Amino acid sequence: MSLTGKDLLGGPEPTRLPDEVAPRELLEGGTPAAEVAAAHPTSSLAWAELADDAYARGAVVESYAYARTGYHRGLDALRRAGWKGYGPVPWSHAPNRGFLRALHALGRAAGAIGETAEHERITAFLAESDPEAAQVLQG
């Protein structure tokens, strides 16, 4: 971080969330996402997994609900990490991926249920957070 808390172009420093070791390891070990979310309800990664699983089986409204939960849990974590409501949230920092995946899942589900304004807002938010995340998740 620079002395002013901004990057060289005058924008805020990228926000890097702390690693959520327990939920990540449980998911990597094959524990069902619902069990991980129940044990670690603040984990955006667990909610993003639930959202993706629901979407894949055609349960779009369920996916929307899971994604919204993951999105809000991620916003809480970002704020605790110093995020001021804008600025980079880099995909390259693996602990940010749960939030970015939940954000993408929310936009995807919003589009699928006809929430056009929310879909557009979330798509823009994802691209502003990190264009790489938008490309990886939407591509």
Image (cartoon, helix red, strand yellow):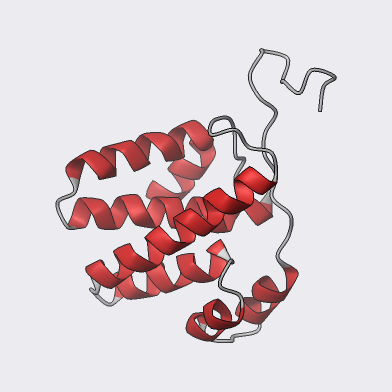
Residue 72 x, y percent position in the rendering:
47, 55
State the residue at coordinates (37%, 34%): 124
Q: Position of residue 15 (x, y in %)?
A: 67, 39
* Residue 22, quarter of picture: bottom right
Is 31 on the left-hand or right-hand side of 106?
right
Q: For the N terminus, which image quadrant?
A: top right
Q: Does 85 sit above or below residue 94?
A: above
At x 28%, y 77%, the residue is: 57
Q: Can I make out residue 92 in this image?
A: no
State whether residue 124 is above or below residue 11.
below
Q: Nearer the viewer, residue 134 or 77?
A: 77
**Left or right: 30 with respect to 120?**
right
Corner quadrant of residue 109 = bottom left
- Classify 100 as above or below 44: above
As drawn, is 108 to the left or to the right of 96? left
Q: Residue furthest right?
A: 3
Residue at 66% x, 13% y: name it.
10
- Left or right, 40 with respect to 53, comes to right
- Vertical placement of 117 versus 62: above or below? above
Image coordinates for residue 75, horizontal then vertical, percent: 53, 49
Which residue is found at the position 74% from the left and 69% from the top?
A: 21
* Residue 123 x %, y %: 35, 40
- Residue furthest left as drawn: 114
**Total marks in image:** 0
| Any part of residue 80 in sight | yes
